[in-house]
Image (tube, helix red, strand yellow):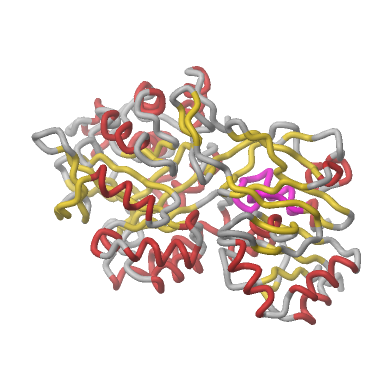
C-alpha cells in the first residue's frame, strides 16, 4: 500500500456543479470553480471534473471552467464526460486538464484507448467504469451514468483496459453512488487485485469509516468522493453561497431526503482519519 | 523598465506544456512555448517538460532539430530545468521498448518499475501518487531550487520509469516506492531536473519554480 490519493469529484452540467441525489435527480449546488478552489486549499490530491450531460452546445462552458481552474489550482485535474475523439482529448488538455477519463467511447471502440494512450501517454488516459451489480453477483459495465447497458463484464473489461494501455481506472459503483452507504468493497477489491494499474474507488462515501474500509479491504489505490465534501462546503459557506451562486441548496436543510446517510466532512479531517488508521497519504 | 525574464518552454509535441506555462504565469512570468532555436538560445531560462514515451520524445527532438540547441543552451551555463520525461531525456539511454538513446548529459539508464506483490499488497505501475522527497549526502538542497523544501515534502509523481545515474554525485533527492529507493531529482552545474511535477504539487511546487526562476 503506497500513498493513497484523496480525490474530489465534481459533476458538472453547463456552468454549474451538480450532484445526483439518489432517486431524486440532479441538483445545482453552485459554481464548480469555488468548490475546486476550496478543496485545493484543503489539501485535495487531485480534482476530477465530469461533464454529466456532455452535450456539444454546452462544451464551451466546460472549457471555460477548466481553464479558470488551471490558472489558479496546481494539482492534477482529470476531465471526463463526452470525450469521443483524439480532437476532444486535445481540446480538453489544451484548456488545462492533465488527464482525461473515457467511458462510452472506449466501450464502443476499445482501440480508442490504445490510440489515445500512445498519443498522449498512458498516464494521461484514465478509463471510467460504471459498474452495476447483477442478481447473480457479477458486475456489468454501463455507460451514460448507468443508463445504458454495454454487455461487458467488469472483470474482463478492466483487464482489457489495462492491456490497451490505460494509465488508471476510476471505478464507480452506480448502485452506491449518491447513497452514502459506503463504497462497494467487493467490486473494488475484485478490480484492484485484477490489474496492476492504479484503481480509484468512487461511489457511496458517506462517512469517515468508509474510507479505510475501501483502502484496507477493497485495496483501492485512491478514493474519490463528492457529496460528503460538497455538503460540507455548502453548510460552512452558506452565506457566501447564497450571494454568489444560483445553487438550490435549501434542500440540504429541509431534511426531506436521506441526508442522514451522508455525514459531511472536509478533506483535512478525512486525511487525518486515514493517518490515524495507519494509511499513508499526503497530510 | 524592468524587463521580464525570458523563459522558453521547449515544445516537442508531446505531453502537456500548458500546466508548466500556467505555473510560470502564476508567478508573474510570461514564458514562450517554442520549437525555435533562436528563442531557446536567447532565453534566460529553459524548461524541458514532458509526458509520454522516451523514444517518441527523442525522435521528435531530433526531427525538430532541438538536440543541438538544448546542448548549446546548457553549455552556456544558464539555468535549465527538466521535468518528468524532461529529466529522463538527459540520461544516456532508456530501457523503454528495447533501447533508446537519450541526450547523455548525465550518464545513466532509465529503467522501468516492475509491478509486484509484497504481503498481499500490489506495487502499481505507473506510480501515480504524492510521494516524499529526501535529501541525500551527495548534494545539499541549499544551492538548488529545492532550497524551499523540507525533507519529506510531498510531490506529485506520475511515471513508470525512473532514472538510475551512474554517479551518485548528481543525485539531489531520493524517493521510496515499494522496494525501490530511486533518484527523484538531479543537479549538475546549471541543470536541475526532477521526476515529480512541481507544477502539479500545489504551493510548495510553485515555490520550486519561483526559486528556479530567481
Image-quadrant location for residue B131: top right
Q: Nearer the viewer, residue A110 or A73?
A: A110
Q: Nearer the viewer, residue B84 or A161?
A: A161
Q: Nearer the viewer, residue B212 or B114?
A: B114
Residue drawn at x 54%, y 58% as measured from the top left: A70
Q: Is residue A86 left or right of residue B22?
A: left
Residue A134 magenta-highlighted: no
Q: Position of residue A14 (x, y in %)?
A: 32, 62
Residues in magenta, as a range: B193-210
The residue at the far left in this view is A135
Residue A48 vertical position relative to residue A218 in the rendered view, above or below: below
Q: Quadrant of the C terminus of chain A?
A: top right
Q: Is residue B83 left or right of residue B178?
A: right
Q: Position of residue A185 (x, y in %)?
A: 29, 29
Q: Is residue A231 visible?
A: no
Residue B209 magenta-highlighted: yes
Residue drawn at x 37%, y 61% as measured from the top left: A113
Amino acid at each position: 500500500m503506497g500513498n493513497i490519493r484523496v480525490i474530489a469529484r465534481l459533476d458538472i452540467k453547463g456552468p454549474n456543479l451538480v450532484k445526483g441525489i439518489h432517486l431524486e435527480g440532479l441538483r445545482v449546488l453552485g459554481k464548480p470553480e469555488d468548490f475546486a478552489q476550496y478543496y485545493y486549499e484543503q489539501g485535495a490530491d487531485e480534482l476530477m471534473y465530469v461533464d454529466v450531460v456532455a452535450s456539444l452546445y454546452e462544451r464551451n462552458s466546460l472549457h471555460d471552467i477548466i481553464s479558470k481552474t488551471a490558472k489558479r489550482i496546481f494539482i492534477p485535474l482529470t476531465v471526463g464526460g463526452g470525450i469521443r475523439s483524439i480532437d476532444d482529448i486535445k481540446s480538453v488538455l489544451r484548456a488545462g486538464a492533465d488527464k482525461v477519463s473515457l467511458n462510452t467511447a472506449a466501450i464502443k471502440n476499445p482501440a480508442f484507448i490504445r490510440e489515445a494512450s500512445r498519443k498522449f501517454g498512458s498516464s494521461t488516459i484514465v478509463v471510467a467504469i460504471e459498474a452495476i451489480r447483477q442478481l447473480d453477483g457479477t458486475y456489468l459495465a454501463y455507460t451514460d451514468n448507468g443508463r445504458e447497458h454495454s454487455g461487458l463484464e467488469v472483470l474482463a473489461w478492466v483487464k482489457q483496459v489495462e492491456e490497451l494501455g490505460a494509465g488508471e481506472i476510476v471505478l464507480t459503483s452506480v448502485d452506491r453512488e449518491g447513497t452514502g452507504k459506503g463504497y462497494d468493497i467487493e467490486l473494488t477489491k475484485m478490480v484492484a487485485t485484477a490489474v496492476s494499474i492504479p484503481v480509484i474507488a468512487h461511489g457511496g462515501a458517506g462517512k469517515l469509516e468508509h474510507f479505510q474500509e475501501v483502502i484496507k479491504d477493497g485495496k483501492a489505490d485512491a478514493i474519490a468522493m463528492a457529496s460528503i465534501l460538497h455538503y460540507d462546503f455548502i453548510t460552512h459557506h452558506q452565506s457566501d453561497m447564497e450571494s454568489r451562486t444560483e445553487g438550490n441548496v435549501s434542500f440540504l436543510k429541509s431534511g426531506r431526503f436521506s441526508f442522514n446517510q451522508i455525514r459531511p466532512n472536509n478533506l483535512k479531517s478525512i486525511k487525518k482519519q486515514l493517518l490515524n488508521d495507519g494509511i499513508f497519504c499526503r497530510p | 523598465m524592468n524587463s521580464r525574464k525570458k523563459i522558453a518552454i521547449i515544445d516537442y509535441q508531446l505531453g502537456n506544456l500548458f500546466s508548466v506555462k500556467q505555473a510560470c504565469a502564476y508567478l508573474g512570468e510570461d514564458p514562450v512555448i517554442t520549437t525555435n532555436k533562436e528563442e531557446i538560445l536567447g532565453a534566460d531560462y529553459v524548461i524541458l517538460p514532458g509526458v509520454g514515451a522516451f523514444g517518441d520524445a527523442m525522435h521528435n527532438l531530433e526531427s525538430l532539430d532541438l538536440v543541438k540547441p538544448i546542448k548549446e543552451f546548457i553549455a552556456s551555463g544558464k539555468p535549465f530545468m527538466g521535468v518528468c520525461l524532461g529529466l529522463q531525456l538527459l540520461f544516456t539511454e532508456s530501457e523503454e521498448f528495447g533501447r533508446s538513446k537519450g541526450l547523455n548529459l548525465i550518464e545513466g539508464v532509465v529503467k522501468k518499475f516492475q509491478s509486484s506483490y509484497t504481503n498481499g499488497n500490489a506495487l502499481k505501475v505507473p506510480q501515480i501518487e504524492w510521494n516524499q522527497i529526501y535529501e541525500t549526502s551527495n548534494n545539499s538542497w541549499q544551492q538548488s531550487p529545492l532550497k524551499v523544501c523540507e525533507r519529506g515534502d510531498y510531490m506529485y509523481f506520475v511515471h513508470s520509469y525512473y532514472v538510475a545515474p551512474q554517479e551518485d554525485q548528481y543525485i539531489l533527492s531520493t524517493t521510496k516506492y515499494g522496494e525501490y529507493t530511486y533518484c527523484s531529482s538531479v543537479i549538475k552545474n546549471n541543470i536541475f531536473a526532477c521526476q515529480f511535477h512541481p507544477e502539479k504539487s500545489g504551493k510548495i511546487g510553485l515555490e520550486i519554480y519561483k526559486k528556479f526562476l530567481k
